[in-house]
Amino acid sequence: MTNTLILIPSRMAATRLPGKPLLKINNLSIISHVFKRAEEANIGEVVVATEDNEILKDVLENGGKGILTSSNHKTGTDRIFEAYKKLNIKNVDYILNLQGDEPNINKDDIVNLNNLMINSNSEIGTLAATIKDRKILDNKNVVKVITESELDKNNFLIASNFTRDNLSKIDQNIYQHIGIYSYKVSALEKFIGLKQTKNEIENKLEQLRALDNKLKINVALAKFSPIGVDTKEDYLAIKKIMEYKS
């Protein structure tokens, strides 16, 4: 049997929207919404990795599990790796890094990514969604991924690039990247051992460290494109959607 551990990095000091993990939607914090979505996927143990006692307290009070990590991490992946080592859970094959700011992530997409990783024996995998609004192509707040050919529900293709740049003049194989990664434990250990690259630092995209070092990232097509909460406007938009649905 293959074992997966879901780790959710979260911290209060977000640059554009400080304190966002504890903003409430339907009287539940964003981070606890994410935890519950991950639990609903039912693919393995779920733990929030955070440097902030306020986040840990909220997660625990809402029935979740969390662990305190260092405040000196440069990336979320560094944080989940520390959490993995501290938890000392045996026989973990895959570690799934789920972003803590996507409270409406679809549980079926989480399950699908995990299944594709196992069935394809992939080292690193992520998700992307079809772009329905072309304004996204020139929005530098939205990360785009380019794949080697067209994504569909049955394939798991290699990413050729990730970028925030304006891609409105390019038409082929561009998708909206969704902030979720699955790693074989050995691939995560290798990734963490690599130095940050110039490309990664300039673009603020840690997945570029993998590509710069010839590590392959497979991409699956998501059924649903979640709203990442990066700004107050994002928060108000997703709050309205989720509270209307309830």
Image (tube, rainbow, N blue to C red):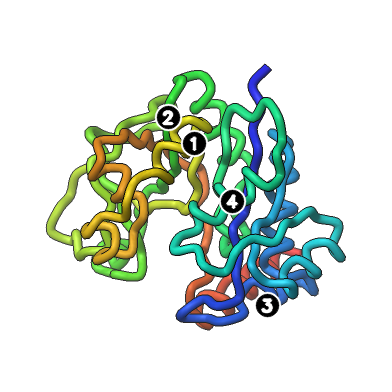
The x, y position of residue 148, in whole percent, is 22, 34
Quadrant of res 138: bottom left
Q: Which mark is residue 183?
A: 1
The x, y position of residue 73, in whole percent, is 50, 63
Q: Nearer the viewer, mark 4 or mark 1?
A: 4
Cα–Cα span, label 4 and label 3:
26 Å
The x, y position of residue 77, in whole percent, is 49, 52
Cα–Cα span, label 2 and label 3:
34 Å
Cα–Cα span, label 4 and label 1:
15 Å
Q: Eyeballing the image, is 72 above or below 127?
A: below
Amino acid at circle 2 = Glu
Residue at screen point 41% across, 46% down: 128
Q: Which mark is residue 82?
A: 4
The answer to the question of whether label 2 and label 3 lie on touching residues, with beta carbons closer than 8 A, is no
Cα–Cα span, label 2 and label 1:
6 Å
Cα–Cα span, label 4 and label 2:
19 Å
Amino acid at circle 1 = Tyr
Q: Sort mark 1 into few (<14), some (14-19) or many (20+) by Cα contacts within 10 Å.
A: many
Quarter the C terminus occupies: bottom right
**Most foreground residue, 34 or 121:** 121
Mark 2 or mark 1, which has the lower sequence index?
Answer: 2
Q: Eyeballing the image, is 218 above or below 237?
A: above
Secondary structure under tag 4 reads helix
Q: Nearer the viewer, mark 2 or mark 3?
A: 2
Q: Sort mark 3 into few (<14), some (14-19) or many (20+) by Cα contacts within 10 Å.
A: some
Location of mark 2 (residue): 123
Location of mark 3 (residue): 23
Amino acid at circle 4 = Glu
